[in-house]
Image: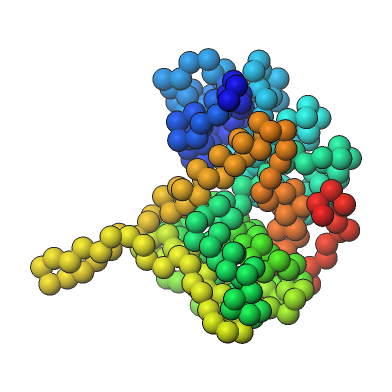
Amino acid sequence: MGDPLGVAVLGAGHMGADHVRRIGTTVGGARVVAVADPDTARAEAAVAGRSGVSVHGDALAALAAPGVEAVLVASPEAAHEEALLAACARGLPVLCEKPLTPDAASSLRIVEAEARLGRRLIQVGFMRRYDAEYADLKALLDSGGLGRPLMLHCRHRNVASPPYFTSSMLISSSVSHEIDAARWLLGQEITAVTVLRPTPSGDAPYGLLDPQLVLFETSGGALVDVEIFVNCGFGYEVRCEAVCERGSATVGEDRSMTVRSAGRAGQDVAQDYVVRFADAYDREVRAWVAAARAGRATGPSAWDGYAAAAVAEAGVRALREGARSTVELAERPALYG
């Protein structure tokens, strides 16, 4: 198979550290050769017990480290654009955790930079495309066996939101996954967004509009509704039901073991996305490593990252203005088909 792919991981927080663990253990064919995080102690902790890994406080220094052949971006979103442009300038394959960048304008700059190169380097970390259930649903819809998809009903729940979470982030951070999943499952663009707000949960932090009901209209005439509830208190749940002309299909139903004892029955509920989508993350990184070693890119593209950012911006406008908001997309470069 040749030498393993040398990967620089940018960001050593929850997601970055999990990817450091994954590369070279769960996922073969690659090894971490550099890690960057402004908190170098955190970066050191993420690579503890590994040899041949350089630690940096600066992302660009990590890109220039010996042995770096590819980049995994798991840093805060504000740092993505600089890292992505630098990786493109060096011709380095990238797996970038979502969002591609914080806003549509900067995401479009990434798309334009990659288009100028004339080849894809960037895969965006919309890992639901690699979840076995979501992949089965995509294959079923593409087969046409249930007829034309009419609606998607989506549910996205978290135990509790981080202290820095804002009402807008329910859409721009959390619902971004449903944005990409809907575009991918349906093969359609999202053209308009409406956000409805029930009375906030008493368990939501003061001022946080949680939960929300987000409604997407698509270019093919389908409707998608998303319940986003980031302080549900009991677990992490992601479900999607596709309602079609001749039937429906649901993914994300309870898959855990049921225990019956002392007159009661119960199931464990995953507490975060790293647990629920562990296999999807493994599949995602394996696909990225295989593609990078073959000199190509696969999976969600920079265009997909840009489109998700544009839809999220429309959703935030709809939330703030209390009115339906249309989605405006730039012309799609030929590079992205």
Q: Is residue 166 visible?
A: no
Can you say whether 25 is above or below 111 in the image? above
Which residue is at the far bottom?
A: 245
Q: Is residue 332 left or right of 238 when viewed as pictured? A: right
Location of the N terminus by quadrant is top right
Taking the view exactly as shown, the residue that stands out farthest to the left is 262
Whole-percent x, y for residue 331 in the image: 88, 58
- Residue occupying image coordinates x 56% and y 75%: 242
From the viewer's perspective, is 270 left or right of 109?
Answer: left
Q: Give the total of numbered labels.
A: 0
Residue at image location 81% in from the left, 30% down from the top: 89
Q: Nearer the viewer, residue 217 or 120?
A: 120
Q: Position of residue 141 (x, y in %)?
A: 61, 70
Q: Residue at x 13, y 65 (%)?
A: 261
Residue at image coords 45%, 26%: 45
| Residue 48 visible in the shown view | yes
Quadrant where the C terminus sits is bottom right
Q: Nearer the viewer, residue 163 or 333?
A: 333
Is residue 193 depicted above or below 257 in this figure?
Answer: below
The image quarter containing residue 112 is top right
Q: Quadrant of residue 9?
A: top right
Figure coloring: rainbow
- Name the spot of residue 219 as percent of width and height, x first: 77, 74
User: Residue 115, position in %: x, y?
Assistant: 86, 44
